[in-house]
């Protein structure tokens, strides 16, 4: 089964740091990605920050071990069919690589999709790998 996490604010990052089953390298990477977006987008320190207010969204795919797949129900196929702006594979350690995909849904909505390489169902893994390879060529 694939679960989908949405990251749009500090609370979501804190929840990932405190109680998720994602690999530590991956959680640290996601927190760094969020911090970078916050630094680029957030101008007023006195106001609470949310990626949604700026038209951004971070989506994280996590798989579980029960063998079921909710892949089709998440809308990820529709997202991939829309055509990503780019997909890249980011190496976090010798053992962990992550897909980072960017989708511009319209002029006001940018979605960043993250998933640990090697943990997705084969169809999704192939599609993301194919997009990443096309970007290299």
Image: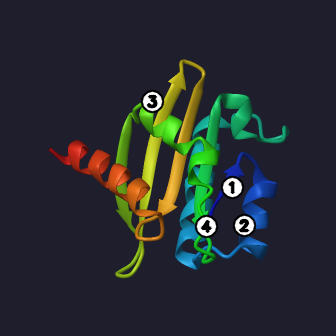
Q: In the rendered view, does 33 fall on the left or right side of 124? A: right
User: What is the CA distance from the residue labelled 3 to the residue labelled 4?
Assistant: 25 Å
Rounded to the nearest angstrom, the CA distance separating label 3 from label 2 is 28 Å
Q: Which residue is mark 2?
A: 16
Mark found first going from the N terminus, 3 or 2: 2
The crowding category of the residue bearing disc 3, from other C-alpha atoms within 10 Å (few below 14, some 14 to 19, many at least 20), is few
Asked if labels 2 and 1 touch by Cβ distance under 8 angstroms, the answer is yes
The residue wearing badge 1 is 5
Helix, strand or loop at disc 2? helix
Quote the CA–CA distance across marks 2 and 4: 23 Å
Q: Disc 4 vs disc 1: Cβ atoms closer than 8 Å?
A: no
**Foreground of the two, 1 or 14:** 1
Q: Which residue is tagged 4? A: 68
Height in image: 24 above or below 76?
A: below
The dot on residue 18 is: none
Taking the spot 45% from the left edge, 29% from the top edge, the residue there is 82
- Left or right of residue 92: residue 10: right
Q: Is residue 11 above or below residue 113?
A: below
Element type at marker 3? loop
Label 1 and label 3: CA atoms lie apart by 20 Å
Left/right placement of residue 97 relative to residue 54 reads left
């Amino acid at each position: 089964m694939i679960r989908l996490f949405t990251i749009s604010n500090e609370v979501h990052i804190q929840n990932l740091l405190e109680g998720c089953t994602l690999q530590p390298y991956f959680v640290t990477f996601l927190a760094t990605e969020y911090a970078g977006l916050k630094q680029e987008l957030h101008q007023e320190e006195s106001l609470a920050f949310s990626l949604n207010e700026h038209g951004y969204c971070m989506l994280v795919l996590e798989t579980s071990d029960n063998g079921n797949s909710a892949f089709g129900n998440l809308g990820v196929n529709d997202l991939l069919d829309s055509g990503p702006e780019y997909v890249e594979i980011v190496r976090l350690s010798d053992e962990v690589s992550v897909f980072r995909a960017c989708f511009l849904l319209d002029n006001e909505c940018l979605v960043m999709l993250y998933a640990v390489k090697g943990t997705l169902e084969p169809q999704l893994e192939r599609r993301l790998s194919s997009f990443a390879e096309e970007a290299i060529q």
